[in-house]
Image (spheres, helix red, strand yellow):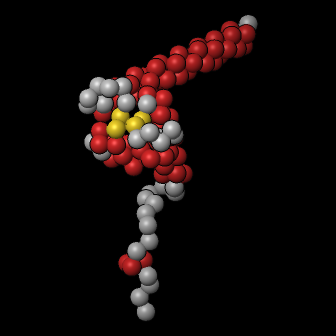
Amino acid sequence: MRRLVLGMSAAALVATAAWAADQQTDETQVAALNRTWAAFAKLDADQDGRISALEAANDPMVAAGFTDADLDHDGYLSKEEFANLMRSLDSSSRARAQARMAAPSGTVPRAADARDTPRL
């Protein structure tokens, strides 16, 4: 009887954790979307519903990806183009974070420089 109660308790705990993870994913996606539109509105200084290259220059990450994100080559980022850019920036940020986490403990990945050459 004791094993049955413990087994059912464990099953309930696992089910609750899975449900909480689903809820958190939905809330995270909504929060990411809200951040995207808030960032768009902040950059869209003239409030014309699109971001020009001059407006994009206020954010170095957006400015760096502006040309690639402007899929229709009209010189502006639409809301859809901006959202795609934000998703690609988020995924590249995640990739960099995962690379940092994969590095052996106590090491920091960095570029090699002249100090790395052995002295004779």
In the image as oriented, which residue stretches furthest toward the bottom? Answer: 120
Q: Quadrant of residue 75?
A: top left
User: Where's residue 20, x and y in %?
Assistant: 54, 16
In front: 6, or 94?
Answer: 94
User: Where's residue 110, x and y in %?
Assistant: 43, 63
Q: Residue at x 44, y 82 (%)?
A: 117
Residue 108 appears in the figure: yes
Q: Residue at x 48, y 55 (%)?
A: 105
User: Where's residue 108, x and y in %?
Assistant: 43, 59
Q: Quadrant of residue 38?
A: top left
Q: Quadrant of residue 43?
A: top left
Q: Is residue 8 left or right of residue 116?
A: right
In front: 86, or 110?
Answer: 86
Instruction: For the N terminus, give its image quadrant.
Output: top right
User: Where's residue 4, x and y in %?
Assistant: 73, 10
State how many labels appear: 0
Above or below residue 74? Residue 33 is above
Residue 97 appears in the figure: no
Q: Residue at x 44, y 67 (%)?
A: 111
In front: 19, or 10?
Answer: 19
Instruction: For the C terminus, give its image quadrant.
Output: bottom left
Q: Residue at x 34, y 38 (%)?
A: 52
Above or below residue 2? Residue 25 is below
In front: 78, or 16?
Answer: 78
